[in-house]
Amino acid sequence: MDTFRYHVRMLETIPAVFDHTLARHPDKTALVRKREGRWEPISYAQFYHDAERVTARLIDLGIAKGDRVAILSENRPEWVMSDQGILAAAAVDVPIYPTLSAPQIRYVLDNCGAKAILLSRDVHLNKVLEIAADLPELRHVVVFDEAAAAAAPEVDRLTVVGWSEFIAAGDRLLESTADERKRRKDQLAADDLASLIYTSGTTGDPKGVMLTHRNLVSNHQTILPLISLVSEDSCLSFLPLSHVFERVAYNAFVAAGATIYYAENIDALAANLLEVKPTVLVSVPRVFEKIRARAYDAMAKTGGIKARLFDWAMEAGRRALVDRETFGSLPPIQAIQRLLADRLVFGKIRERTGGNLRVAVCGGAPLSRPVAEFFEIVGITLLEGYGMTESSPVIACNVPDARRLGTVGRPIPGVEVSIGDDGEILCRGPNVMQGYFNMPDATQQAIDGDGWLHTGDIGEFDGDGFLKITDRKKEILVMSNGKNVAPAPIENGLITSRFIAQAVVIGDNRNFISALIVPNFESLEHWAHAEGLLPPATSGDPVDRPSLIQNPKVKALIRSEIDHHSADLAKFETIKEFALLPAELTQENGELTPTLKFKRRVILERYRDLIDAIYAPGAAARS
């Protein structure tokens, strides 16, 4: 095993980290992609060589230190090759979510003044060509997919080339640019700007978060020893690299000399996990929620002795978890039950994630305690952390030997955390951004005169220094009676029901709390078939979901689930009324951010009629 441990002051820039990894692991597999049904490995030496060719070509095109170069692509090896190449040229990379619309992309490219963009395929190229006339600074477009580049029409001021042509030109320039490439890397400083990451913009226009090399390196080098990441580790990358959470994970894996597999797409995630068998999984809560829901749903469908065995195992695991948290160890009889449950049930659940997971890391949104408990019970170490783009991102994190369910862990070494008078979490350290690009007023609002970053989150420490997030400062609902309600804990409680996939709590300026509920249709339809509300599943007829959710028995089922999973709430927090939605809220429809958080303003506007009906006079028994 590679026992290398990162030294805090050893390396200060991303290119220096990459150089160090190359020296240690030139022949090791760095990146793996799947093409035509086969996983294709790329060594660190090849990864480095391709990044060098990107740097050489960018320098030849006139990209100077500090110039902005955008990346618009789903996760793939060319993304990280471009990233490393841009940073080695001392330029600033600007990642753009591939799901953004043409106007949203125009805003980012115009705001940052990007001179070049590397993008994935025809759909992204078409968006850029549509807005090119409005982007006078943009000169160069590189397309990873060759066919899309070849079919591109000519556009004034814009040069469009394919990846192969771009890389080949860089290869020819390696010798002539050698001195300049070395000079740029040697002169690159820790406080030089590395990346402009635009916030997802749940309210208003996105802001360009300025992250330096120090910000990014300090964050991943602190995390490496906390989770004991080593070169033998592997992960499956599927969260967008445009988001800082996946970005710091990728930086950490490169620093460790580990292997990164790229998922084919989110729909292929379950199959890819079985093929890749990663040792580390980095994800947002929604993925972990789905893994748990599918386990419960599979047992419900099976029925009989297997379902009873599953229920027994989960209860045995729950008792063992409580005793371990309370006493630190298990009585002999419980230890035997836990071992038996593991062999009969939990091991099979772990196999569905590939069977090799030693640790899973969760961030980007709050993780409900029942989901965290599920993974702890089945024997997968799930570490919830906390951070934001402005903090590069990690502020606090549970670690394998110091974790507490229901919290986001303790602040990571080198980062200070304080709780303001109004309960807001404040952060200070080497991970805090330089500020917002060309927005000094917004920067002053976010970072006070003492260097504290105001996160906008509400939280508290327990007696042992573990941080608990209670809600977003801006998302607290203020009811018409003056009561304050935090929606996230209520929503997280509701989605632990196997019949509820998503829940959006409503009540701002209202006299009672309500919710928009998206059922877990897989579980609901199975239940409906068993209840005779739908024809036998073997009939093959598609389910009319809009009609199904109007069925009184379905509404009664969801009502009972809401009541059961919110039984501990205060009376004013309870959900008096709800409306069922016929389809999941998605990123593609603009209802979720790229990290799957609700865009509440969008949702409230889109479903205004449903919400108005909930609050129509006489629609609910108010209290």
Image (cartoon, grey):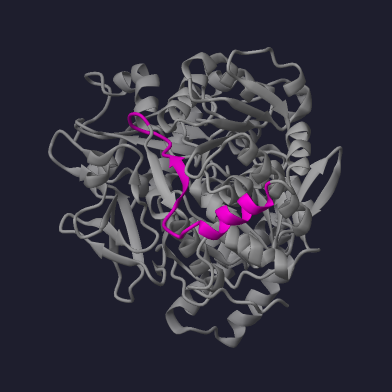
> Which residue is nearer to you in this view: 597 or 480?
597
> Which residue is nearer to you in this view: 424 or 14?
14
Quadrant where the image shows the C terminus: top left
User: What residue appears at the point 74 percent right and 62 percent down from the top-left corner?
Assistant: 355
User: What residue appears at the point 70 percent right and 16 percent down from the top-left corner?
Assistant: 152
Q: Is residue 315 left or right of residue 200?
A: right
**Magenta-span inclusion, residue 192:** yes
Snapshot quadrant of residue 255: bottom right
Residue 378 place in picture, x, y as percent = 62, 65
Snapshot quadrant of residue 54: top right
Q: Is residue 47 left or right of residue 89?
A: right
Residue 294 place in picture, x, y as percent = 64, 47
Of all residues, the one furthest to the left in this rendering is 481
Looking at the image, is 434 positioned above or below residue 506? below
Residue 463 place in picture, x, y as percent = 29, 75
User: What residue appears at the point 69 percent right and 27 percent down from the top-left corner?
Assistant: 121
Residue 462 place in picture, x, y as percent = 30, 70
> Which residue is nearer to you in this view: 256 or 612?
256
> Which residue is nearer to you in this view: 485 or 305?
485
Quadrant where the image shows the N terminus: bottom right
Q: How many marks?
A: 0
**Magenta-span inclusion, residue 142:** no
User: What residue appears at the point 58 percent right and 47 percent down from the top-left corner?
Assistant: 89
Part of the protein shown in magenta: 177-205
Q: Is residue 258 visible?
A: yes
Looking at the image, is 514 positioned above or below residue 299? above
Looking at the image, is 198 positioned above or below residue 606? below
Q: Is residue 232 visible?
A: no
Q: Is residue 206 left or right of residue 71?
A: left
Looking at the image, is 54 positioned above or below residue 453? above
